[in-house]
Amino acid sequence: MIRGQSATPGRVPSVVLALLSLLAAGLALVPAAASAQTGWSGEIAVRAVESERDLPEGEEIDSSGIGIRGEIGFDLEASRRTRVRFEAEAGGFDYRDSTRKSRETYGGTASVSHDLTDALEFRLQARRIENIAVLEANQADQTSVGARLQWESGNDRVRVSADYRKREYDLGAPASGDGYRVAAQYKRRIGAYHWLSIDLSHEEMSSIESPSRSYERRVINATYSLPVAKRLRLLPSIDVRKWGYDARIAQGDPAGDFRVDRYAAPGLGLAYGRADSGPFFRAEAEYRLRQSNDQRFGQDGLWIGVSAGYRF
């Protein structure tokens, strides 16, 4: 892509055609047996962000603005234990900062899930998404492949996953990066809309053409869902992150070390709606207590996000 531009209209049809080809290939796998089941699902939502810290390169979309996103999925139950899903997504985000152009994204995902036992599920997934904001660059295209193992019994669920990601950065000179992400999640269901979730992840990205994009990041997140009325719940949370770059000298660091950032973000959310269908609403507020050995990136700040939409 041309630096500073959103995905051009000429590229949209190629993405759509690729997704339709992928979907057609999946439909060709449908067994002739009448027992095969299919279904469609989708979601459309608008989102607004207000952030005291509008950084050109930050935590994904950290800057203030408003956006819209849509997703449609097709599910195929190929057998009693095997399911196939295809998804297509598109969205846009209009930054309040006039120096940043609006962003348009397009992508698609294909996944296959298989029940190894009644409690153990294995999933393979491939995904392509264009023109996204990532930690190390304002705009990038990403292709990823990954696997996930999930164990669920009673009210307990454990997930472990690993993904390999390849990124092409939207820079003046061609540059790319690749790396992996490993993650684990434990979720305890206490009752209807009442649960506790703990997430851990570690990721690395390396770029030969643009070494300043190389980084390593660790994340710990805990979220508690407390029902307060029918389909309405409070979501207190804590998010702790640490990341460092392989080739970015920290400005103002007496030792001249590479940049290392940390933050702890206590948050509170309010959510309404069902997980599978119908209208939904979610409002979140975090106060991000941030530390950095680079004097430009150590400011604390309030972050607020509001989204509303419909699932069908």
Image: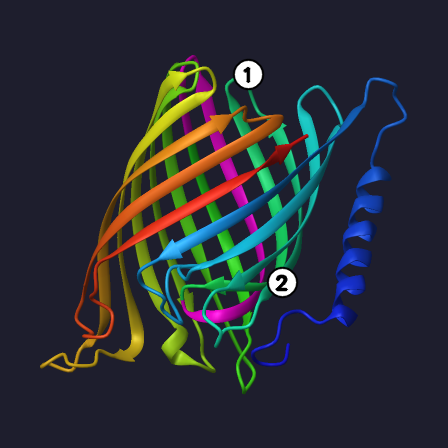
- At horizontal 62% and vertical 60% (from top left) the residue drawn is 105
Asked if the stretch drawn in magenta spans residue 125, the answer is: no
Residue 249 vs residue 182: left or right? left
- Residue 118's tag is 1
Residue 241 vs residue 225: left or right? left
Residue 290 vs residue 167: left or right? left
| Secondary structure mainly formed by the magenta segment | strand
**Quarter where residue 238 is shown:** top left
Q: CA distance from mark 1 to mark 2?
A: 41 Å
Residue 259 percent across, percent down from the top left = 24, 73
Element type where label 1 sits in the image: loop
- Judging by the rendered image, the residue that carries numbered circle 2 is 104
Amino acid at the residue labelled 2: Glu
Q: Return the residue nearer the eye: 234 or 81.
A: 234
The answer to whether residue 189 is seen in the rendering is no
- At horizontal 40% and vertical 74% (from top left) the residue drawn is 213
Amino acid at the residue labelled 1: Asp
Can you say which quadrant of the picture contains the N terminus? Answer: bottom right
Furthest residue toward bottom: 173
The answer to whether residue 241 is seen in the rendering is yes
Furthest residue toward left: 254
Q: Return the residue nearer the eye: 159 or 278.
A: 278
Q: Earlier in the sequence, mark 1 or mark 2?
A: 2
Residue 127 percent across, percent down from the top left = 62, 52
Residue 27 percent across, percent down from the top left = 84, 38
